[in-house]
Image (cartoon, rainbow, N blue to C red):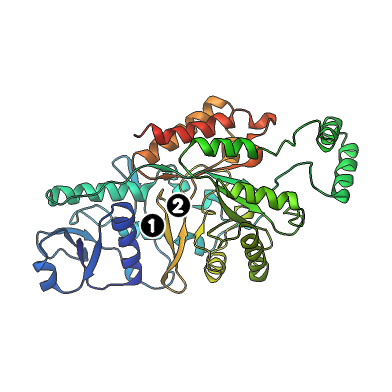
């Protein structure tokens, strides 16, 4: 066990130390403000305060873990080895910066509580993040810092048996629309037909009726391929179905259609099934509650995980709603059009509510790449290199790679050419680490 001496034990300090030490490094941690207890401890120990006590391993603390609420923090980012850091603390410390304060700033999404301009869907944009501005969005900096911290502890305490963790892949499949042509109902089919004619999309009109008359498979119906793939690999796919009411933003199949309910049930036999929250359910607790109850009735078990439509994430209200409905996990933390680590980590972490200053039970699974972000890469080779680079970054710290694809990503549509190969590349990366 690692014993940490600090002058003040706060919820923030407890939260971030347990993430870095326990979740990332598998080291149990406890705290003390009593010097006698600290001196008597004969195993892993360190001090985290303004000044070093003696010759113990020491990290000079930044004030952020001892504050409450938000403040205007002046941040200067420095280059450190092959990565970046901030909250510089001088040379009288085991590290040139406060890794715990910096990690808390990123994990709590402190910057997303501060005033910022949102995009058209009300989302925090990657370009406004400290990681994007200072070019470390592509690195899981918290995990990199944690492993450097572990290396220092190993030098100081060579007899301590440090545990290892292993690289994992947790694929996510978003299903905002299960079928493109099928099972839409008479009015939506007529509307789609008229739209095809008006926009002179004769090829799509032809394809629409080949599908409706059973001569061709619906282009979005890739579920048999996904289930067959799931049967062959160990990583469990997390499939998120949108079941909210039809709206301008949400256009999936109605759950009154037995074929759609049957599809969800059949997928749940092989994969994990979660709820993709509707656009209007994100800010409306009653709509969200209705969708959760509906999904639980379909899968006949408690809803474990959810993801937000359009990846819209308003902190902290969105997460508070999930906590109130006893949803355990969220997969919305990431950027749609940017590859990288929105919270600076590739390890699942608990949501910390900055307004209430409490660690919550909601586990955040931050994804690193969405298929749409790869579309900006011109060639398949560029896409492959981007995925391989991400795999290498995460494997280096034995983290969890969470890529997000859609059911239609695996269709024969031209712009998704090669994405099955990218998906297979990610799945095979687990075997390569053995």
Residue, x 42% and y 36% (percent of image)?
Answer: 391
Between 37 and 167, which is closer to the camera in this rendering? 167
Alpha carbons under labels 1 and 2: distance apart: 9 Å
Q: Is residue 393 visible?
A: yes
Quick check: can you spot residue 253? no
Residue 214's place in the image compared with 381, above or below, is below
User: Dot 2 corresponds to which residue?
Assistant: 130
Per the rendering, the mark at residue 386 is none
Assign the N terminus to one quadrant of the image. bottom left
SS class, disc 1: loop
Q: Earlier in the sequence, mark 1 or mark 2?
A: 1
Q: Position of residue 327 (x, y in %)?
A: 53, 64
Q: Does residue 188 appear left or right of residue 398 in this picture?
A: right
Confirm or deny contact between disc 1 and disc 2 (CB under 8 A). Answer: yes
Residue 306 in the image: x percent, y percent?
56, 57
Q: Residue at x 34, y 34 (%)?
A: 434
User: At 41% across and 36% down in the image, what residue appears?
Assistant: 430
Q: Secondary structure at mark 2?
A: helix
Residue in the foreground of this view, choosing between 234 and 50? 234
Q: Closer to us: mark 1 or mark 2?
A: 2
Q: Label 2 crowding class (10 Å Cα cut-off): few <14, some 14-19, many 20+?
A: some
**Quadrant housing residue 375:** top right
Residue 263 percent location from the top left of the image: 67, 47
Residue at image point 18% right, 50% down: 161
Against 89, residue 285 (above or below) is: below
Residue 75 numbered tag: 1
């Amino acid at each position: 066990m690692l014993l940490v001496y600090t002058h003040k034990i706060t919820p923030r300090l407890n939260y971030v130390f347990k993430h870095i030490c326990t979740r990332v490094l598998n080291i149990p941690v406890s705290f003390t403000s009593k010097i006698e207890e600290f001196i008597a401890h004969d195993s892993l120990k360190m001090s985290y305060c303004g000044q070093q006590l003696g010759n113990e391993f020491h990290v000079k603390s930044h004030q952020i873990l001892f504050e409450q609420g938000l403040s205007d923090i002046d941040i200067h980012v420095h280059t450190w080895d092959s990565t970046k850091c901030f909250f510089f603390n001088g040379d009288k410390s085991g590290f040139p910066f406060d890794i715990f304060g910096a990690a808390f700033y990123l994990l709590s999404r402190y910057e997303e509580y501060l005033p910022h301009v949102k995009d058209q869907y009300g989302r925090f944009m990657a370009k406004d993040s400290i990681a994007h501005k200072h070019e470390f969005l592509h690195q899981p900096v918290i995990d990199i810092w944690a492993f450097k911290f572990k290396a220092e502890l190993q030098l100081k305490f060579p007899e301590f048996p440090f545990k290892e963790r292993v690289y994992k892949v947790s694929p996510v499949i978003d299903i905002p629309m299960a079928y493109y042509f099928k099972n839409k109902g008479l009015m939506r089919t007529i509307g789609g037909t008229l739209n095809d004619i008006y926009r002179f999309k004769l090829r799509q009109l032809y394809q629409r009726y080949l599908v409706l008359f059973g001569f061709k498979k619906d282009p979005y119906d890739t579920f048999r391929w996904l289930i067959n793939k799931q049967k062959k690999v160990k990583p469990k796919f997390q499939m998120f179905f949108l079941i909210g009411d039809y709206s301008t933003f949400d256009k999936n199949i109605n759950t009154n259609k037995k074929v759609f309910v049957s599809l969800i049930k059949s997928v749940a036999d092989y994969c994990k099934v979660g709820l993709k929250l509707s656009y209007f359910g994100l800010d409306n607790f009653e709509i969200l509650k209705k969708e959760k109850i509906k999904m639980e009735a379909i899968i006949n078990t408690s809803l474990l995980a959810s993801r937000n439509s359009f990846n819209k994430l308003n902190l902290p209200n969105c997460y508070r709603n999930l906590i109130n409905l006893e949803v355990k996990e969220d997969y919305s933390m990431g950027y749609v059009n940017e590859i990288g680590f929105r919270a600076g980590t590739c390890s699942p972490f608990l949501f910390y509510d900055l307004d209430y200053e409490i660690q919550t039970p909601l586990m955040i699974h931050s994804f690193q790449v969405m298929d749409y972000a790869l579309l900006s890469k011109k060639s398949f080779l560029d896409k492959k290199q981007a995925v391989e680079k991400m795999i290498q970054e995460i494997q280096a710290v034995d983290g969890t790679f969470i890529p997000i694809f859609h059911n239609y990503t695996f269709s024969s549509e031209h712009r998704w050419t090669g994405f099955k190969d990218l998906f297979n590349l990610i799945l095979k990366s687990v075997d390569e680490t053995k």
